[in-house]
Amino acid sequence: MSQAKPYRADTGEPGLGTSVQSLARGLELMEFVVSAGEPLRLRDIAARLGYDRSTALRLLATLETCGFIAKDPASKLYSQGAKLARLRRFSPARGLLIERMRPYLNRLNEATGMTTYLGVLEQDQATIIEVVPAKHIISVRQMPGDTEPLYRGAVGKSLLANIPEQLQRGMVESMRFQRFTARTITDKQSLLRELREVRASGLAFDEAEGHDDVCCIAAAVLDDSGYPLASIGISMVKAMYPGGARGQATWIEVVRETAFAARRSVVPT
């Protein structure tokens, strides 16, 4: 029996109709935008995938119309759309995790008034799967489906810190670091050092590492083997809270206690 070989959108293999090639290219483009972890420009998408700009624009427009890709009207940047976020969010296993974690997200939201979120490890990035908005007018806006590199924020670091060491080192070795702010971790040794601190303390912090105005506190929800099922945390506007995330002693303990309490809802007793 012959083994089927994978099809790439740019091969131009005979026998494949134009509609199939367009579908393959659209899926490749969508995967690239979603996995990037940050909004992208048209020219960068086209250059990275080797498409001419008119082809990339046509595919993006189609995906945007279908709700799988979103375009910011002001910045003209492309990111994951709401429909794709909903599809990823409501897989059966993920839906059950969200239902079990929602009371703890609400509890954390009530205790702090901040935007609270639930994140999971998804390949080489952290994905937000549930959000409870802040009660303050001035607050951090997050959405289910938002993604970020594992080295950049509290949710990613809390997840990465608690996976088996061999797997963790392999993931760190394969990372391509990008500087988002002056405080972004951009080298492997600094990241490994911070991951050891996160694992020991049970808490991860984002001190304006992804955005100059945003700080976060997060803690992993572990299963009975110590593997991180999810990360639960809060985001705050840095200028409103002197001392940043590490300076909020009361909230730090609330996040820690909430993650520990949440563990009891997913670990059999």
Image (cartoon, rainbow, N blue to C red):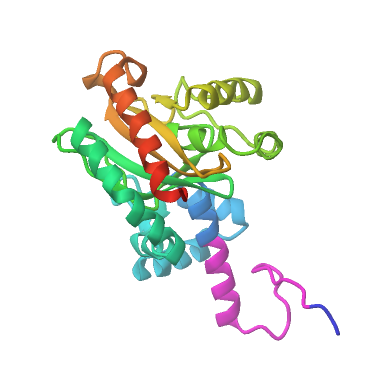
Q: Residue at x 34, y 49 (%)?
A: 101
Q: Position of residue 66 (x, y in %)?
A: 37, 70
Tell me where the magenta segment starts and ends, as one range: 4-29
Q: Is residue 263 visible?
A: yes
- Asked if residue 266 lies in the magenta stretch, the reply is no
Q: Quadrant location of the N terminus?
A: bottom right
Percent position of residue 187, x then y? 62, 24
Seen from the viewer's position, the closer of residues 158 and 49 is: 158
User: Is the residue 145 above or below the residue 17 in the image?
Assistant: above
Tell me, yes or no, if residue 113 can be seen here: no
Q: Is residue 87 left or right of residue 152?
A: left
Q: Nearer the viewer, residue 39 or 34?
A: 34
- In the rendered view, tell whether residue 208 sits above or below residue 82: above
Q: Is residue 30 left or right of residue 139?
A: right
At 42% from the left edge and 33% from the top edge, which residue is drawn? 219
- x 41%, y 70%: residue: 62
Q: Position of residue 153 (x, y in %)?
A: 45, 32
Q: Position of residue 232 (x, y in %)?
A: 38, 39
- Farthest residue, direction right: 1
Q: Does residue 23 show up magenta in the picture?
A: yes
User: Which residue is nearer to you in this view: 21 or 55?
Assistant: 21
